[in-house]
Amino acid sequence: MAKSNKPVVWSLFAAGGTLAALLAPVLALLFLLAALGRAPELLGYARLHAFAANPLGKLFLLTVIALFLWHAAHRLRVALHDFGLRRDRLVAVVVYLAAGTGTALSLLYLARI
Amino acid sequence: MSRRPFVRLVSGTRWYFGHPRYLRYMSREVTCIFIGAFALLLLRAVERLSAGQAAYASFLAAIAGPWSALGLSLVVIFALHNAVSWFNVTPKALPVQIGEGFLPGGFIVAAHYAAWILVSLAVLLFAGVL
Amino acid sequence: MNERMVQLEVLRYDPQVDDEPHFQHYEVPCKEEWVVLDALNAIKESIDPTLNYRWSCHMAVCGSCGMMINGEPRLSCHAFLRGFAGVIRVEPLAHFPIERDLVTVADDFIDKLKRVKPYLIPGEPRPIGAGEYLQTPAQLMKYRHFSMCINCMLCYAACPQYALQPLFLGPAAITLAHRYNLDSRDGGREQRQQVIATDEGVWECSFVGACSEVCPKAVDPAAALQQVKVASTLDWFREHLLPGSAT
Ligand code: SF4
């Protein structure tokens, strides 16, 4: 048995999990407020656009979106296996491809702002 | 004497009903669905933002309403569950040895909770909620 | 010293006559301070001498009396009767084949234990004249809690990933490998990594944490496996990204 290459995806999973633990509740809360019709100032067009136009803002958004996606993708792969879907290879390709596509798209969108 | 070991089969699809701790584990694992969905929502927000003011305004209008509020409440709840279950096990992955002893796990967990609270407050301040 | 009647439901399996295991009900007069193992001994002595189970030390050291007691992997010498109400269900350790009654086939675990080389492998040859290997208390404490394992296999009976993927090396074996990897006198880490840093090694673990909850010696295998993941991940980046360090 050769050494595994899972460290690649696991490190993204772990980094994403830590970031999600720190940030996901409060960020989701901001959107929940928006859904309740009380959108916080930051989610208004002017401020969010200014934030995303700033290189540091871009980096923040990219990191959050990409790492959340990779975290979710890897855990979903494990969870599907736990729920009894045993086509691990196929599942891995699909979820990581999705996370990779999402990462590329977020780069693209952020570059446009 | 003949050996004829008996193998008890474990259901590959229903095993987690076998013990409460397995259900607890699965409740942690399904948080990924909500984290992933929220990441897609953020991606969509950025995409609409890049498409201009009108596009973004219609995005904000689209996510207002009771059903989004319900969905986002679930995201908040599962994100909290991920956070708590994540921080609570940090000492296991990253123990800190000081001399002959180890830093009590409670300290490491508490430090993470403190950072979590500070970060959340900072985001709320920055977002203009507080 | 009060006595009371205790009801036990014990899983029986006789490979020569049974096609599958079945529960047998016993009513045993027990002393208040007894453990489940005492009740089994009382059955064997005065009710049913055909009952088979393993035990030796009666003091949570030998690791041979592990059983499922009311669905929980426990050492039967450590499971006090006063902690149970009603009928106590006793079954052989989960996830292992049943040899007979409460006796399981442990070959798979023993084989995995051997594969991780759970002994000191000196980094370089050292003549006896060079004296003993010295170790500071701090170096000892680094791995000491992981060295408390008694090979009772309760963690395997608790681990759903071992049940779903029997090739998984499992909690105790990987923990023991980690224990030697952490030892300042050892130089065999790379040999063990070849076995444990694999898909069927530590990467089959999804951190359910059940192993640590049932471990009778507070070994905390779940922590060991997480630490092995972190260390193996650092290895991977070192081996693949640092120039000139490919092994
Ligand atoms: S790690 Fe704990 S539960 Fe597992 S075999 Fe060792 S002593 Fe038993």
Image: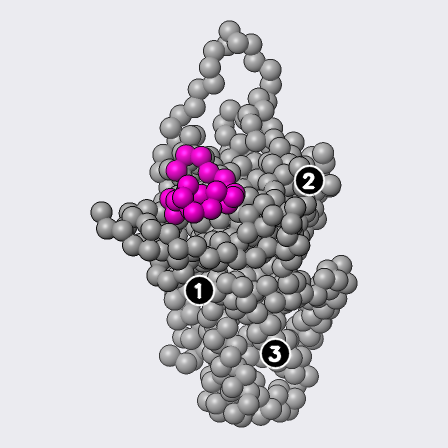
Q: Are marks 1 and 3 in contact (CB under 8 Å)?
A: no
Q: In the displayed structure, would residue B110 be above or below residue C219?
A: below
Viewer-proximal residue among C119 and C136: C119
First in sequence, mark 1 or 2: give its number. 2
First in sequence, mark 1 or 3: give its number. 3
**Amino acid type, residue under disc 2 in the picture:** Ser
Viewer-proximal residue among C105 and A29: C105
Q: Which residues are magenta?
A: C37-58
**Amino acid type, residue under disc 1 in the picture:** Val
Q: Residues within 10 Å of mark 1 (few under 14, many from 20)?
A: some
**Chain under numbered label 1:** B
Q: What residue is shown with label 2?
A: B2
Q: How is the image coloured?
A: one colour
The residue positioned 42% from the left and 30% from the top of the image is: C140
Q: Gap between marks 1 and 3, in whole Å?
A: 23 Å
Residue B111 visible in the current orientation? no
Q: Position of residue C5 (x, y in %)?
A: 33, 55
- Numbered disc in front, either 1 or 3: 1
Q: Gap between marks 1 and 2, in whole Å?
A: 52 Å
Q: Residues within 10 Å of mark 2 (few under 14, many from 20)?
A: few
The extreme left residue here reads C1
Q: What residue is shown with label 3?
A: B41
Q: What residue is shown with label 1?
A: B84
Q: Position of residue C170 (x, y in %)?
A: 59, 46
Do marks 1 and 3 share a subunit? yes
Q: Secondary structure at mark 2?
A: loop
As drawn, the label of residue C113 is none
Q: In the displayed structure, would residue C127 be above or below residue C22?
A: above
First in sequence, mark 2 or 3: give its number. 2
